Image (cartoon, helix red, strand yellow):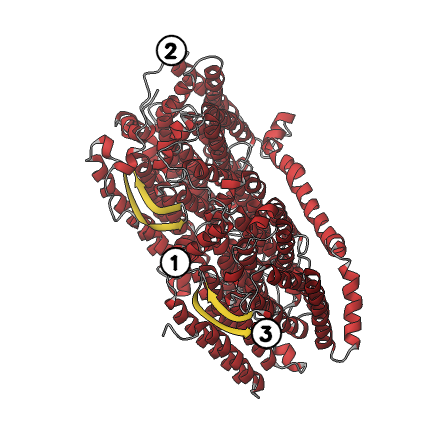
């Protein structure tokens, strides 16, 4: 079983599935087929993950390697470490959840002639690329997936979004392409400073190179800009609120919850691993940008009046935390950041999808001010929405606390000032999260003059796995940390920064 | 001055494996009631009450087992599982049972369970939809009203579980889970009737202000991990004496910030008055007896840090002294019975904080006062709830008067609480508060005079405003309209808990004082050497009692013997300031809220125009690009191809340069 090309299978199944879904004549069948395929992919993903061994000394497992364009040094090389594996699993779990959540979201589109089948097929295509981008261990292959992802997302936003979908989709595309082009230059240049040859683009061939210092800095910057746009960090975040508020909630989940993680994942895999010295050189700037993102995103979230924009800005803040943890370059901060990527996926999914349920019930209005008092009429939706809000403010007991806490602790070990400056974000988060809840859910029962249903069975099935994940990883983060930790240690070895080891309890070396 | 024995926590063998049930039972109740839906409406409240009592029952054998052991082996630690293992950060979830935590466990489960019982009666006909502003509901809507009673008991159970986790945790990190858990329960219960917008705002305010304090706890944990490499109490206690004073002062001050938030101490006290928006049993349990005392627990639990950081310790005492006067002054002017009690809670916790800031001399009195206060203040809040129950939810004491004739049980039980809080011997508060005042007078220089003086004056003011409250409510002429109000005694489910608590108000102090509570707590907080206050003890006690007598007499003259005006007199500037909580709210609004909101809005505007525009002037570019794209039939594919093409050109250029 271990010899099967698991990662390729995880990409082929949804891709083939998407073709089937696209040509199905009935929208209902298409939806069911898409859901089935996403569940099969998830099951395969779980089986693949079971082959993964946490104690292994190798950086990558489930490895596949084939020569692709040997003249250019490009290989079709896949493999995962603990970080990539958890992100792939995150994507595979969120996909069926999102498909189920989007079940009735396309009634308007179906009426206006846009095909439901296309939406579900594009979501499946996205799965292929999400797996590919996290599994690629060849820099060029990674770049191909990195750019290819844009296509389904462009159509998912541009064809199936809300009022400003075209503007938002093009803005998203231009920002991403800009970053992608800069990265392309760096990718090509990297090949030339590397050993070259028919497998010159392999991550393993490019790790630990002795690059001229200024070249290394330029290469780092090339990659970093692309990842910062994707992540998104201040000041190149402005595409995200537009894209998220124009997208369907399910699209927004995969976009913000998974695809944007390519940015932070790329920082770990490529910036830190391939350009360790330049990473150390850039750290002060990156940490400053991360802290600004944290506070700026949270402040902006407070000022928003649109649910989807508000959630998008919370993500700007949370991505700031992830970047902060990565560049703290401690095992605690790195582990926290890697765990944050997973937790943020579940938290954001819960926020977007539950808000989606509210928007659906309020005839498409995303304005927070159009709600109020809904706890009285939909207590179930209000309850799960509150849990989602609490996960956004990182309440202990929920998984988001563990990762945020680790980022704080790990950052303080090396950069206490940065950790302390970022700290007010915990207050700001409680303000945006609970104020959003207050404006929409509390107050006197609204007089809508119609029946508004509470959580349906389908919606309960959508929400349940998210809340289980938030609670489960809150009390038992070990499940994920055991997989993540070796990968983080490995990265730190590449960076060759000595981990700030915790002082031994008995030595009391402070004096 | 003291020898620290706290470290023995880790050494003393395996703990009782079933202690986790203490937390798990009420948590199970909360889960069943919240997830079970309407099916649990009928039995849910009873189940929640039973599970809370079950926790108390589990606690008893733990206490007996502890008492049967040698004092040096009473602290037992039990590791449950590996919670957060990453790199050097190996954090286990574990339970620490020692004399300090078991004292809290008994308080929480006993008072908490009594309040569950009380709530069975109090929340029987929860008129929640009536309390919301707005219109009458249609019959159809009423039939779909969410079951608030079940939700109430679920939250109460959640609170008990979180509070128990807070005091049982064996590390700061796990303590913080309980710390935020009680904050959540408090938020949910303050906003229990959040169909009333003001109540929803009060709930948010409580959470936000507490979060400001939480920053302190978080930062303290960061600093502790960076220096000690661990967050469990045993390791911290072991490492603290060897750490630099600067670090310990920093950690101490940060922990104090956290404590001021949770315990409503100056300058983070503003939320507690508004928190009275919650149902009265909640005010009794969370905002008087247990949660608000968590700050005191945190300080006492961190004794190893504070004992080596005198500056931080003094800061604790000073904050306590300021707050005890602050609360007392605010209490003087309040006409709302619940807000007056809230001000008194703030003030009494000030006493505990003051004591906790005195070091080993004061710790035991801080905890003793915390326990006696838990009984008498909870009893008085339940009494206030009983009065409201009989008076159509009226809270304005100027509308009360002569209620002793109608509510005998409430009057007597409340009266015992009143005697206890003002410190009349031999009632509970006398023993604990007198201990605090005496300890405050211990020390050198001007410090004991200032702290002791504040505690002494506070005792006099307390006697005045609590007597004012008691007389305005139960004595004097009836100031309510007989046609409108029909005061009556509450049902047994409510009065029995009040009676039980009043026994505590009367006798708990005596029991603790003579029952050896001081030596019981010693293994945790250290042994205090024989100490001598700057004034002889009988003088301090005499002064205290004289001030109490004067305060109570003045209140009697003004509020029982004389007529109480129904409309509050305009009052001096001082009265106005006290009524307005000494303008804390206005200060917060002007300094933080308004500039904060303005900043957020300004940034939002700048983000839409400035940042978005500046980043490559993209806005206009996108506008033109999108219109030109729309002109092309197959716009996207072509532009994409074009981009790829330009990419290849750049690529080739790069290759050429490199070669």
Label 1 crowding class (10 Å Cα cut-off): few <14, some 14-19, many 20+? Answer: few
Residue A385: % across, % down:
52, 60
Question: Eyeballing the image, is A468 above or below A461?
Answer: above
Vertical placement of residue A339 versus B508, above or below: below
The residue positioned 47% from the left and 37% from the top of the image is: B223
Alpha-carbon distance for marks 2 and 1?
A: 72 Å
- Mark 3 — residue? A105
Q: Is residue B575 left or right of residue B443?
A: right
The label on residue A453 is: none
The percent position of residue B491, horizontal first and vertical second, equals: 37, 47
Q: Which residue matches tag 1? A: A57
Q: Few, some or many C-alpha atoms within 10 Å of disc 3 (few <14, some 14-19, many ≥20)?
A: many
Question: Looking at the image, is A479 positioned above or below residue B509?
Answer: below
Q: Answer whether labels 3 and 1 touch (C-beta < 8 Å).
A: no
Residue B419 in which image quadrant = top left
SS for dot 3: loop
Helix or strand or loop: what does disc 1 sit on?
A: loop
Instruction: Indicate the chain on which mark 3 is placed.
Output: A
For the C terminus of chain B, give its image quadrant.
bottom right
């Amino acid at each position: 079983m271990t010899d099967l090309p698991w990662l390729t299978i995880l990409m082929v199944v949804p891709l083939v599935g998407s073709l089937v879904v696209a040509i199905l004549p009935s929208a209902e069948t298409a939806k069911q087929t898409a859901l089935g395929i996403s569940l099969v992919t998830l099951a395969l993903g779980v089986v693949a993950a079971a082959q993964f061994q946490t104690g292994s000394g190798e950086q990558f497992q489930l490895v596949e390697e084939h020569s692709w364009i040997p003249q250019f040094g490009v290989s079709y090389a896949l493999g995962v470490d603990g970080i990539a594996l958890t992100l792939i699993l995150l994507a595979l779990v969120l996909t069926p959840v999102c498909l189920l959540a989007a079940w009735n979201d396309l009634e308007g589109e179906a009426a206006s002639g846009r095909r439901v089948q296309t939406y579900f097929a594009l979501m499946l295509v996205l799965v292929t690329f999400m797996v590919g981008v996290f599994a690629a261990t060849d820099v060029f292959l990674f770049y191909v997936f990195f750019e290819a992802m844009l296509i389904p997302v462009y159509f998912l936003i541009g064809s199936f979004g809300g009022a400003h979908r075209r503007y938002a989709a093009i803005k998203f595309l231009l920002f991403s392409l800009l970053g992608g082009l800069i990265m392309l230059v760096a990718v090509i240049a990297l090949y030339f400073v590397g050993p070259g040859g028919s497998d010159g683009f392999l991550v393993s061939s490019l790790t630990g190179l002795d690059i001229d210092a200024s070249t290394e800095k330029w290469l780092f910057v090339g990659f970093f800009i692309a990842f910062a746009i994707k992540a998104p960090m201040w000041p190149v975040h402005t595409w995200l609120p537009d894209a998220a508020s124009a997208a369907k909630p399910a699209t927004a989940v995969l976009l913000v919850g998974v695809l944007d993680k390519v940015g932070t994942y790329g920082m770990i895999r490529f910036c830190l691993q391939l350009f360790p010295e330049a990473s150390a050189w850039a750290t002060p700037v990156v940490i400053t940008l991360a802290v600004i993102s944290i506070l700026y995103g949270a402040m902006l979230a407070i000022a928003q009046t649109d649910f989807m924009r508000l959630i998008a800005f919370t993500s700007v803040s949370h991505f700031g935390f992830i970047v902060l943890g990565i560049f703290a370059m401690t095992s605690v901060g790195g582990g926290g950041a890697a765990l944050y990527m997973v937790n943020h996926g579940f938290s954001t999914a819960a926020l977007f999808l539950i808000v989606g349920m509210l928007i659906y019930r309020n005839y498409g209005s995303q304005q927070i001010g159009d709600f109020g008092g809904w706890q009285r009429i939909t207590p179930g939706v209000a309850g799960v929405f509150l849990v989602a809000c609490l996960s956004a403010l990182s309440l202990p007991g929920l998984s988001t606390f563990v990762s945020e806490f680790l980022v704080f602790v790990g950052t303080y070990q090396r950069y206490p000032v940065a950790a302390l400056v970022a700290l007010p974000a915990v207050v700001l988060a409680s303000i945006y999260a609970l104020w959003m809840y207050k404006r929409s859910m509390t107050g006197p029962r609204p007089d809508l003059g119609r029946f508004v249903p509470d959580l349906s069975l389908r919606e309960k099935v959508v929400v349940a796995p998210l809340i289980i994940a938030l609670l489960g990883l809150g009390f038992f983060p070990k499940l994920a940390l055991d997989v993540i930790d070796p990968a983080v240690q490995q990265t730190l070895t590449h960076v060759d920064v000595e981990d700030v080891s915790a002082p031994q309890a008995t030595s009391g070396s402070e004096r | 001055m003291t020898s620290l024995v706290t470290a023995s926590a880790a050494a003393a063998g395996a703990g009782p494996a079933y202690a986790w049930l203490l937390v798990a039972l009420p948590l199970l109740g909360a889960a069943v009631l919240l997830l079970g839906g309407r099916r649990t409406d009928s039995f849910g409240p009873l189940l929640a009450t039973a599970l809370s009592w079950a926790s108390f029952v589990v606690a008893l054998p733990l206490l007996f087992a502890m008492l049967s052991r040698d004092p040096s082996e009473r602290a037992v630690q039990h590791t449950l599982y590996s919670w957060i293992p990453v790199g050097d950060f190996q954090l286990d979830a574990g339970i620490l049972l020692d004399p300090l935590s078991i004292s809290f466990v008994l308080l929480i489960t006993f008072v908490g369970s009594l309040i569950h019982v009380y709530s069975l009666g109090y929340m029987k006909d929860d008129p929640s939809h009536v309390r919301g502003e707005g219109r009458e509901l249609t019959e159809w809507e009423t039939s779909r009203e969410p079951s608030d009673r079940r939700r109430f008991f679920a939250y109460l159970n959640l609170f008990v579980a979180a509070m128990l986790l807070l005091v049982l945790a064996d590390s700061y990190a796990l303590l913080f889970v309980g710390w935020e858990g009680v904050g959540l329960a408090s938020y949910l219960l303050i906003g229990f009737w959040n169909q009333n917008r003001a109540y929803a705002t009060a709930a948010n305010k409580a959470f936000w202000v507490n979060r400001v304090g939480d920053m302190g706890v978080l930062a303290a944990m960061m600093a502790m991990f960076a220096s000690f490499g661990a967050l469990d109490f045993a390791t911290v206690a072991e490492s603290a004496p060897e750490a630099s004073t600067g670090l310990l002062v920093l950690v101490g001050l940060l922990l104090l910030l956290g404590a001021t938030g949770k315990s409503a101490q100056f300058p983070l006290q503003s939320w507690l008055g508004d928190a009275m928006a919650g149902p009265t049993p909640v005010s009794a349990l969370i905002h008087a007896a247990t949660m608000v005392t968590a700050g005191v627990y945190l300080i006492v639990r961190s004794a190893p840090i504070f004992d080596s950081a005198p500056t931080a310790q003094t800061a604790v005492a000073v904050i306590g002294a300021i707050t005890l006067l602050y609360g007392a002054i605010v209490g003087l002017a309040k006409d709302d019975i619940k807000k007056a009690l809230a001000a008194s809670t703030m003030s009494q916790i000030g006493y505990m904080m003051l004591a906790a800031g005195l070091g080993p001399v004061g710790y035991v009195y801080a905890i003793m006062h915390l326990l006696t206060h838990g009984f008498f203040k909870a009893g008085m809040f339940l009494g206030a709830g009983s009065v409201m129950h009989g008076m159509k939810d009226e809270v304005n004491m100027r509308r009360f008067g002569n209620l002793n004739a109608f509510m005998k049980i409430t009057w007597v039980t409340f009266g015992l609480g009143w005697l206890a809080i003002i410190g009349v011997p031999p009632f509970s508060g006398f023993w604990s508060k007198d201990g605090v005042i005496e300890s405050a007078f211990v020390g050198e220089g001007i410090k004991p005079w200032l702290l002791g003086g504040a505690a002494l004056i506070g005792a006099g003011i307390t006697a005045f405003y609590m007597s004012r409250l008691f007389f305005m409510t139960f004595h004097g002429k009836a100031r309510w309209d007989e046609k409108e109000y029909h005061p009556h005694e509450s049902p047994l489910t409510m009065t029995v808990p009040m009676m039980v608590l009043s026994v505590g108000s009367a006798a708990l102090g005596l029991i603790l004082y003579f029952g050896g509570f001081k030596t019981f707590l010693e293994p945790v907080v250290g042994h205090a050497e024989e100490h001598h206050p700057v004034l002889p003890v009988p003088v301090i006690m005499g002064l205290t009692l004289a001030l109490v007598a004067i305060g109570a007499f003045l209140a009697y003259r003004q509020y029982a013997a004389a007529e109480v005006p129904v409309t509050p007199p305009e009052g001096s500037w001082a009265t106005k300031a006290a009524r307005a909580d000494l303008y804390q709210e206005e200060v917060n609004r002007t300094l933080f809220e308004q500039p904060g909101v303005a900043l957020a809005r300004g940034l939002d505007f700048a983000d839409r125009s400035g940042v978005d525009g500046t980043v490559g002037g993209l806005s206009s570019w996108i506008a033109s690009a999108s219109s030109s794209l729309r002109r092309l039939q197959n716009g996207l594919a072509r532009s994409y191809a074009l981009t790829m093409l330009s990419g290849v050109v750049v690529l080739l250029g790069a290759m050429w340069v490199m070669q």
